[in-house]
Structures are given as C-alpha cells and as structure tokens.
Image: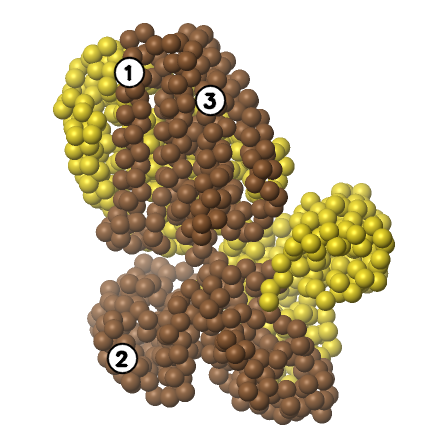
Chain colours: A yellow, B brown
Amino acid sequence: MEFKVSKELISQIEVLITSKDDRALETLLNDLHPADIAEILDELDANEATYIFKILDTEKTAEILLELDEEQREDILERLSPKEIAEELDALDTNDAADIIAELPQSRKEEVILELQDVEHAKDIVELLRYDEHTAGGLMHKELVKVNENWNVLTCVKEMRIQAENVSRVHSIYVVDDEDRLKGRLSLKDLLTTSTKTAISDVYIRKLNMVKIDTEDVEVARIMQKYDLEAIPVVDEMGILVGRITIDDIVDVIKDEADKDYQLAAGISQDVEADDSILDLTRARLPWLVLALLGGFISVRVLGLFEGAMLEHGHLFFFTPLIAAMAGNVGVQSSAIIVQGLANNTISGSLFNRLIKEVSLALLNGSILAIILFLGSHFLLDVEMIVGLIVTIALVSVIIIASLIGTFIPILLDKFGIDPALATGPFITTSNDICGILIYFSIAKLILGF
Amino acid sequence: MEFKVSKELISQIEVLITSKDDRALETLLNDLHPADIAEILDELDANEATYIFKILDTEKTAEILLELDEEQREDILERLSPKEIAEELDALDTNDAADIIAELPQSRKEEVILELQDVEHAKDIVELLRYDEHTAGGLMHKELVKVNENWNVLTCVKEMRIQAENVSRVHSIYVVDDEDRLKGRLSLKDLLTTSTKTAISDVYIRKLNMVKIDTEDVEVARIMQKYDLEAIPVVDEMGILVGRITIDDIVDVIKDEADKDYQLAAGISQDVEADDSILDLTRARLPWLVLALLGGFISVRVLGLFEGAMLEHGHLFFFTPLIAAMAGNVGVQSSAIIVQGLANNTISGSLFNRLIKEVSLALLNGSILAIILFLGSHFLLDVEMIVGLIVTIALVSVIIIASLIGTFIPILLDKFGIDPALATGPFITTSNDICGILIYFSIAKLILGF
C-alpha cells in the first residue's frame, strides 16, 4: 500500500523529461503525495527536478518544497526566479514560508519578499523572520482560529468558517478580548455540543497553557509533552496572542534534540547525515578526534612516568588498554544516564544521594567484574598472581572514579548552563582513559615499589 | 506561570495528610493539572500518595494514574481494590486503560476486568489487550468518530455530537460502508463549510493513509512523520476500521526509540532511568561491561604476542592506549552516523559508494591527525623518530579499518534483521581496540623486525 521509489520509476521519469512529455509526467505524478514526489526529486539531478517542479501546480510544489532535502531544495530554488519562489511561498503557511526564506542568500531574501502578493501574509512572514529559530517565536505559525469573548456561539461559528479557510488544522479555538489579549480557549467539541445562542464568555475555558514568544523550543516541547497538548498558543510580553505552535513541529524538535544528543555522545558535533559531504562530515568529526589524540598524548606521558616498571614488570603494560577501556565504558554509561535524566527531568534527590547511589552501583558492578578479571588473569592470561591482584584492585578503583566523573561532569556543566551532552562520548572516554591509567600504575607502584 | 514542585509544598501536603484535613487538600490540589499532581505524588511515599488518591475525584485520579512513574503507579494500585481500580479505568480511554491493566499481576487483571461497569468499554479493552504493545494494535485507541457513507452532512453532524462525547480529540471523521469497512475521511473543516443537505459520499476524501493492525510501531511513526499526520486509522485484515492512533502516542514511540538507541550506544541494554534501582541499573549495564572486559582479555593476549619488543622498543607500549582510543572513537562516530541513517531512512546509494566515501573520509581525517601525531611525538613526547613514524603509519591504517568496521557492521546487522544500534558503543569500541592494537604492533614488527 505504501509508496516506494523504485529504480524503474526514476528511469521512466528521466525518459519522460528528456522527451519533454509533460502530460505523461503530470498524470504520473499528480496522484502522488508531495512527500513521495519529494523522494523522487531527491533522486533526480537538480535540472531534472526543477523541470518537474515547473510543470506541477504551485499548491503541490509548495508542499514538495517543504519535504525536500535541504541541499536539493537549495539547488532548485537557485534555478527559480524571485517571482516564482514568491508564488510558492504564497501557498504556504507563514511559518514554513519563513523557514524557507531564512535559507536563502541575503540578497535574494529581499527580492523574494518584495514579490509576495498577499500583503498580510508577507507581513506575518517578515515578523516571523525576526525570531530565533530555537524559540517559540521561531516555531509558531501565525495561522490560528480566534474569537472574541463578547461574541455568541453563532457568530463564532460563522467567523470560524471564514478563518478556518486559512488554517489546515483547527485544534483549539482561542478566545481573546478586544485588545487581542489571550483569555482562554474553546474546544471544537464544546462548540459542536452547545446551543448557538450561548455567549462565548459563558462556555470558554479560562485555564490554558501558553508560552511566551521567547521561550526556548526544548522548553515548549517539554510543556507540550507533559500536558499532552496538540497545540499551544504563544503570547507576547503584553499577553497578546501572536501565534500558535502545533505538535507536528514539536515532533521535529524532539527528534532533532535526540539526534543531537546521540551524535554528541558519539563525538559528532554538528547535525550531519550519512549522505552529507565529506567536508561536512570531517568538520563534525575531526575536532573530537583531535581532542582524543591530545588526550592520547597525555596518556603516553603518564605511561612514561612509570617507565621504571618496564624491565621487571613489563606485563603491567599489557593491561593498559583493558583498564582504559573499562574506565571509558563505565564513564560513558554513567554520563548517558545522567544526560538523559537531565533532558527528561527525571532526576530527583540531592547530590549526596546520587553520590551514594553511584558508588554503590560501581562497587556492585566492580566486584563482579573484579572476580571475573582475577579468575581470568589467573586461568586465561597466566600472569603472575601479584599482577592479577594489582589489576583487579585497580579495576574496582577505576570503575568507582570513572562512574563518578561520568556522573558529576554532566551535572556540573548543567549547573553552569552548558549542554551536558557535550560531556558524553570522547570527552568522558578520554579523561577516564587518562585517570584510569594513572590510578592503575600508581597502585602498581605502591604495591611493587618500582 | 508554570507549576514547579517545591519542598515547602510537599511538607505542607504531608502535614495536611497527617492531620487528615481532606477539605484543605482538595482545595489545594483541585486547581492543579493531573500531570502536576502526579509530580507531587511521585515525591510522597506510597501510603500518602494513596491517601490523596482516594480523596480526589475519579475523573482526576484516572488522569493522574497515567502520568505517574511506573513504580509509584504500581505501589498505589497495590493499595486499591479491584473495584476501585475498575472505577479509574472506566474513566479512561480504552488504550490507556488497557496499558494499565497490562501492568497488573495476572490474577488481579481478571478481577479488575470483571469489575468494569461499561460493558462496551470492557470489550474494547479486552480486545486491545490481545495486541503486542509494539504494533499498531497496541498503540491504537478504540475511540474515534465514524460516519456512514450513505448519510448526509446533517445526520453526520448529529451523530458526531453523540460520538464526540467519548472522544477527547476529533481530528478526522472516518467514513465507513455498511460493513464498517474504511472508505475515506472527512475533515472537520470541510464539514464546517459544507451545506447540511450534501451527501457524505459527495464530499468525503477517498484517499487516506491507514495502517494494518499488526504494523510495527516504529513503522507507524515513520509514516505519520513522513505524511505529517496527526491521526491515522487502523484496519484489520478485512479492511474494517478497528481503531485510531494519534500523534501524542507516536511522540512517545519516537522518544522511546531515540532513548533506546542512545542507551545502546552508551552500552546500556534496557530502558532504565537515573532514578531506577541499583539492581535494574546493574542488569542494564553489567552485560556490556563483561563484554568489554572479555575484549580486554583478548587485547592482553594480543599485546603478549609482541612481548619481544619490550626490551628494545618499550616505548611502543606507551602508545597502545592512544591507538586503541583513536580506533574506538572513529568506530563509534562511523557507526552512529550509519545507525541514525538507517533509522531515519536517509541512506542512499550502493555499498560500494559508501565504501569509497568512508575510506576517503578516513584518509582525510587520518592524514590531518597523522601530521599532528607525528609533530607531537617529536616535539612533545620526544620519542625516537622511528617510533613516531610507526605510530603515525599505524594511526592512519587504524582509522581506515575502524571506520570500515564501524560502518559495515551496523549495515550487516540491519540486513540480517538485527537492530543495528546493538553494534554501537562497547561492541564497536572493544572490537576496534583489539584490531587497532593488532595492526599497530604488526606494523611495528614489520618495520623494526623484533
């Protein structure tokens, strides 16, 4: 039932483009959903994609534009005149139109805005362009349905019919006073089940969640998730209703935030995808590798401090990767749990309780691993008993320290207003590698006295 | 404006509970949103929470039940009779009620179901309990608004008023034939703007997305995101409309999936939170640490193979943590990008092209890092030139191999239907550690001939 792009379909379309058979192309594509057509266009080269773009209706192409890969969209827009772009934008919601304009080069931005036909729409778009994309203002749509608290249900339904023309999904009906200040909301269901003569002020719900125009996007997502909202109104400093954020935009915020945290944990610092250019991927990955390399220099230096052990106790050096790996893994686990807890607001209790818990957890994990290691070093690796003992003691100490570093560095960063996700991945593994090796050889030196 | 649980509020409530001042408790809590009351109850002990639970209205407590932590919910439900639980469930949507019943111990399940008052509701709940929670059937609600294709708009609006009583959010109105087979949908907006005498068959939209009852939850999420849907109807094998999935449930699926991938990448194998018990956390973390430890045994063995180098070229051993760390970091980066690409369906092109791309990327990153390493080993670490050279050559080779392992293991797992996210984190770092060390010393042996 679901649409899938096939190689056959792509070559069929390429043949039709070469032979300029617009009729056949239209018949083929008109039945498809814009998201599906976007998938097809992503497989074509920019000139072919632009060709198809020009033969389809604006209503359809405007939707396609939203669904395209950023790079392909850029390539197609480059091939359109400011007037053609403006026609697409006139067919879109203000928020989507503003997002697309924001991607254009500065000089084209102004040309395109001047070509917009619907002046009210253009004003709204220009207003939205002012807001940071990571705030409620940057997420909101200007399209919404609002009624005056002094109306009755009949006037309200009439007005709604007019306003609903421009709103793709009604959700709530917002109630405002004469100054456009947000007073409450009216559910569609209530409206369907109330007599037409009732005054709006008698039926509307006065309690409602709202956000300010400068509320951060992540905070908006948190509120909408907590209260299970499908739309939330946005007000300015005066309490005037200026827009509305719907759950589909929040889904993107949640997804982007999760993707960002995931990438940071893997040591990737910008939002990249497998299909991005090698240069983009390098920019996102190299800085963390350089950090890890510099950390590696420190670990070489630390090992150099214990060079004296090499003659008599060379076997100790065989265990450095093992100790470093365990320290890294434990640290990443601890930091991931804390970073997720901070993001989802599920961390309760005092710092001291957290400390006790982490240490107990580390002791439990550490003891079990210590037994495996001690037995393993004796039966599988046949090293001297004393080396096995040192490695085992070191392992438990390293696991405790690594889990504390993994837990408290993110908490510390969060307290200082820095994204705790930065502390996961290479940062934690590198610092835990170094600490782990230092602890290991210090214990060895203490016991063996080299 | 937003509600925050304070210590003062909690102690105030505890005092009121001790003095059994129900009136004051009600006044204090009745104005709050169920999600906020749930936050308060999570801070109280189970007996206090149950006390509050019993003095509030069922309508409110039913909502609170949904918002509680799983553990606290379990503790409260243990303290309620089957009849009391059934009263809560009667006030909930079928899907939410089924989710809560599913959490009960087997014997209580049946007792509670027998106590449900609304027989239709009970039937729907029992039906939903049959479906796997990770399928469309497990996600769907039975509550929806449907109209017959043979009605006109007026009959339709009347019927909707009745049906809408049980549906918290209308979204779409589904059109069915006399056998309840799904034929299409009607938008609320269309209904608002169409004359009351029009036949439904003249205005309804025949094309609509739907999912089968056994479609996987992740697939439902993908379809709803791709086509930007706020609700999707679910049909059975005969095409009969059996339920509806709304976007708020999908938000949870997306979040859970992202959390799961994130945790797997950090070496945590079950869905745990910072506030879970030490035993739960150990169960989730220990298996990966054991895996890493066993990997560590292998690395000890591998290093043992090159013991001969220790006398003359002991400095080589100082670099093992550096090489292992770089191999691990590169592997995690590559695997994270591929796992995310597989999850978001953004990987295109052939395997061969992917190979070329990964090798180019590794060469670019590797060369830059090699220069830093070579200069660093000379000026910062003052090791012999030949050791610096060996480490540098090893680094480039290791980066290429690690990025290939990181890229192709997830792709391979995915091809065999195994979750590729399993291959991130400890699995990749451990195997790359071992490969990295082996490559490094093999190169050293080749050049130095020990």
Q: Nearer the viewer, residue B10 or A406?
A: A406
SS under mark 3: helix
Instruction: Establish if A386 lies above or below B377.
Output: below
Q: Position of residue A264 (x, y in %)?
A: 48, 40
The numbered mark, 2 or 3, whose residue comes first in the sequence reads 2
Residue at 20%, 21% in the rendered image: A444
Q: Earlier in the sequence, mark 3 or mark 1?
A: 1
Callout 1: helix, strand or loop? Answer: helix
Q: CA distance from mark 2 to mark 3?
A: 63 Å
Which residue, given by chain and number where applicable, does mark 3 sit on?
B395
Residue named by callout 2: B110
Q: Which residue is mark 1?
A: B307
Q: Which amino acid type is marked by label 3?
A: Leu
Answer yes or no: is residue B79 visible.
Answer: yes
- Of the pair B404 and B195, the residue shown nearer to us: B404
Q: Please provide percent x and percent y for residue A190.
A: 56, 83
**Residue found 26% across the figure and 48% down from its top:** B282
Q: Is residue A281 visible?
A: no
Residue at (61%, 82%) from the top-left corner? B175
Using the image, name the chain to which the residue with label 2 belongs. Answer: B
Question: Which image quadrant is residue B83 in?
Answer: bottom left
Horizontally, residue A392 falls left or right of residue B354, namely left
Q: Where B368 falls versus A408 (above or below)?
A: above
